[in-house]
């Protein structure tokens, strides 16, 4: 199968993720969209790795997974702390800091 | 059973034997010391009794920073080389960045560790996980708990900052980016007072930071697709890096251009350049002030180090493509920072917009990949960073009733009469930011403007001079409020800090003035340090 298709899929996933970050209001959903962007990058890495016949891209994908896991630990801790304080995880409600 | 064994040995003999890469531990020692101390800090947190933790953590942190700085000094005349199988570039520029980050972090940790201004407590929430205003929080405060986790978190962050400007491949750079960012997201949300603001700052910083690192990652993927390598530069002809692929025009330019754009977005977010600056004022205002001082200075230095390495080493061959974009970003950053700072009534927020403005000046030095531009950037960063740490340290001293920092500018009225020493120190830092002669940043600005002129970008210099004129207005306004208006009857009190914070303030002010009066030593050092491993 033509590896280009995976690149198009990866670009679509990345764009969907970026769009989701910009239009969704729930911090958890925004965060899921960011994870979608990271996974889109992983798909691109693995595809390019296959196209170039080199392993660097696959190794990069593994590191991305580890980093994404660490990011989940930190991110969920922050989101849950904010939720316990405000009883809301909406990014629109976090509006004390402005201008 | 025997057949399976035979098959597996045959498979093993087909693959090349695995040879462990040679790791130059000595050249990596600054990062290893800091990250090792951070790991020990986690153990201290787990096993040391609560009463002993504060002393142990602060001692460990300061010792590690001093030891890592000594390691940088010991490495100062190592020849330019790449270590850890090409992942880390150890050159003069790396060492200059690492030394600067360590020195500024040391001063910042002195301010972070301050307990006297709060009556035996530090600037961090007694228990980060407790809900603000809850019974649990009151009990934690009454028990006098301290969040000593801050120190290992700060050390991990510094470890990432040391690696960020040294990374010679995009994988190392991405990991360093996350190692420096993740602990900062957490400590931003740990302020003792105004906890809602602090948590909101952490949420915004985290979501936008993760968003920008996703762009960085996708940019790295596209550059990998273009070059077939994630290394920025590799002189081995069998194993070319991104720089070599750019020089040889490996593939169509679409992957390269999109890759540069996405990677650049990730890095420009970290330096707080417009139009990716939106997080800066909110995070600087909400975060605990000592942390704001630390991250505004150290993160910016590390991120500019990474930006220099990506642009000057990896993408130097396509300078014609990214230079116009960098010029537009520089102009936009200076205009946005200068104009929005005018409207601020909060000192921390004003300093945040001033940080955006100064990021614009520094970006001017990126338009050229030449030696002089890099040298001017290397001079500007430490002088600016140390003044920034000092100015935020002054902000921690001005307190309203209840120990909350008085950050509203109107509360600072008459501070020059009621507290002449902090007001004078703040004036020194503000005059330096304004670029008044005989201060360090004047020399830095001069060097950067000169480099931009030499690179053929006079339009940048014109915008920068106009922005400086606007900036002088809002910096001087603070000084006028402090010295030429009467103190309020219920004005803020000035905390009497410990000897550590006094030292930090004195050193920052002294360096700011000394580097303006006699800049030759640092100019010489930054000139000699502007050597990149290509």
Image (cartoon, coloured by chain):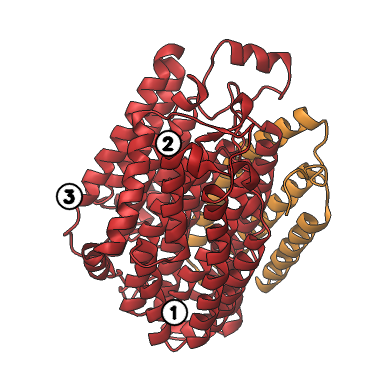
Chain colours: A orange, B red
Where's residue B348, x and y in %? 59, 48
Q: Which mark is residue B74?
A: 3
Which residue is at 40% across, 27% downward?
B41
Asked if labels 3 and 2 touch by Cβ distance under 8 angstroms, the answer is no
Q: Which mark is residue B112?
A: none
Where A9 sits versus B54, above or below? below
Relative placement, left or right, of A67 versus B136 is left
Q: Closer to the N terminus: mark 1 or mark 2?
A: 2
Where B174 sits versus A49, above or below? above
Where's residue B64, x and y in %? 30, 36
Marked residue chain, label 1:
B
Where's residue B37, x and y in %? 35, 33
* Dot in front, 1 or 2: 2
Marked residue chain, label 3:
B
Where B396 sits versus A33, above or below? above
**Label 3: few (<14), some or many (≥20) within 10 Å?**
few
Relative placement, left or right, of A48 versus B74 is right
Q: Closer to the N terminus: mark 2 or mark 3?
A: 3
Asked if labels 1 and 3 touch by Cβ distance under 8 angstroms, the answer is no
- Are the residues flagged by discs 3 and 1 from a single subunit? yes
Q: Which residue is mark 1?
A: B245
For the C terminus of chain B, the image quarter is: bottom left
Q: Which residue is mark 2?
A: B111
Looking at the rendered structure, the secondary structure element under dot 1 is: helix
Looking at the rendered structure, the secondary structure element under dot 3 is: helix
**Measured Cα–Cα span from mark 3 to mark 1:** 35 Å
């Amino acid at each position: 199968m033509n590896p280009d298709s995976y690149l198009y899929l990866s670009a679509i996933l990345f764009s969907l993720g970026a769009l989701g970050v910009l239009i969704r209001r729930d911090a958890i959903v925004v965060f899921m969209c960011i994870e979608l962007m990271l996974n889109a990058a992983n798909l691109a890495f693995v595809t390019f790795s296959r196209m170039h016949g080199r392993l660097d891209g696959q190794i990069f994908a593994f590191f991305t997974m580890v980093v994404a896991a660490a990011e989940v630990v930190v991110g969920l801790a922050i989101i849950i702390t904010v939720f316990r304080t405000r009883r809301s995880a909406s990014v629109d409600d976090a509006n004390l800091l402005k201008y | 059973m025997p057949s399976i064994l035979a098959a597996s040995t045959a498979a093993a003999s087909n693959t090349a034997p695995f040879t462990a890469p040679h790791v130059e531990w000595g050249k990596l020692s600054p990062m290893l010391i800091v990250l090792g101390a951070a790991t020990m800090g986690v153990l201290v947190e787990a096993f040391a009794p609560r009463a002993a933790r504060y002393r142990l953590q602060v001692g460990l942190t300061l010792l590690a920073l001093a030891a890592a700085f000594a390691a940088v000094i010991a490495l100062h005349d190592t020849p330019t080389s790449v270590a850890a199988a090409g992942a880390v570039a150890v050159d003069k520029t790396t060492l200059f960045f690492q030394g600067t980050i360590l020195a500024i972090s040391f001063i910042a940790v002195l301010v972070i560790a301050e307990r006297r201004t709060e009556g035996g407590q530090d600037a961090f929430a007694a228990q980060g996980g407790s809900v603000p205003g809850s019974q649990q929080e009151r009990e934690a405060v009454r028990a006098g708990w301290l969040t000593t986790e801050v120190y290992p978190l700060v050390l991990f962050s510094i470890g990432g900052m040391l690696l960020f400007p040294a990374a010679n491949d995009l994988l190392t750079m991405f990991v360093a980016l996350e190692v420096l960012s993740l602990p900062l997201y957490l400590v931003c949300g740990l302020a003792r007072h105004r906890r809602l603001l602090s948590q909101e700052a952490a949420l915004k910083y985290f979501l936008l930071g993760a968003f920008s690192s996703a762009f960085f990652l996708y940019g790295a993927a596209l550059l990998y697709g273009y070059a077939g390598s994630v290394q920025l530069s590799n002189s081995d002809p069998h194993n070319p890096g991104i720089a070599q692929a750019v020089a040889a025009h490996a593939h169509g330019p679409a992957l390269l251009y999109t890759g540069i754009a996405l990677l650049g977005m990730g890095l420009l977010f970290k330096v707080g350049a417009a139009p990716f600056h939106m997080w800066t004022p909110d995070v600087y205002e909400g975060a605990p002030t000592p942390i704001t001082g630390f991250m505004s200075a150290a993160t910016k230095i590390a991120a500019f180090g990474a930006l220099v390495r990506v642009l000057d080493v990896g993408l130097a061959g396509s300078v014609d493509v990214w230079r116009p974009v960098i010029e537009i970003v520089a102009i936009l950053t200076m205009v946005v920072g200068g104009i929005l700072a005018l409207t601020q009534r909060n000192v921390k927020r004003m300093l945040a917009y001033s940080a955006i403005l100064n990021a614009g000046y520094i970006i001017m030095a990126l338009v050229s990949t030449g030696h002089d531009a890099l040298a001017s950037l290397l001079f500007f960063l430490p002088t600016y960073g140390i003044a920034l740490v000092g100015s935020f340290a002054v902000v921690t001293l001005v307190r309203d009733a209840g120990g909350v920092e008085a950050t509203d500018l109107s509360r600072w009225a008459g501070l020059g009469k009621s507290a002449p020493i902090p007001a004078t120190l703040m004036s020194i830092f503000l005059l330096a930011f304004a670029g008044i002669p005989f201060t360090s940043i004047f020399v830095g600005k001069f060097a950067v403007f000169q480099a931009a002129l030499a690179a053929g970008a006079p339009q940048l210099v014109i915008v920068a001079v106009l922005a400086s004129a606007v900036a002088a207005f809002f910096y001087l306004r603070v000084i006028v409020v402090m010295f030429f208006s009467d103190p309020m009857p219920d004005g803020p009190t000035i905390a009497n800090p410990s000897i550590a914070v006094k030292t930090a303030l004195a050193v920052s002010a002294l360096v700011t003035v000394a580097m303006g009066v006699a800049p030759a030593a640092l100019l010489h050092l930054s000139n000699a340090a502007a050597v990149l491993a290509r």
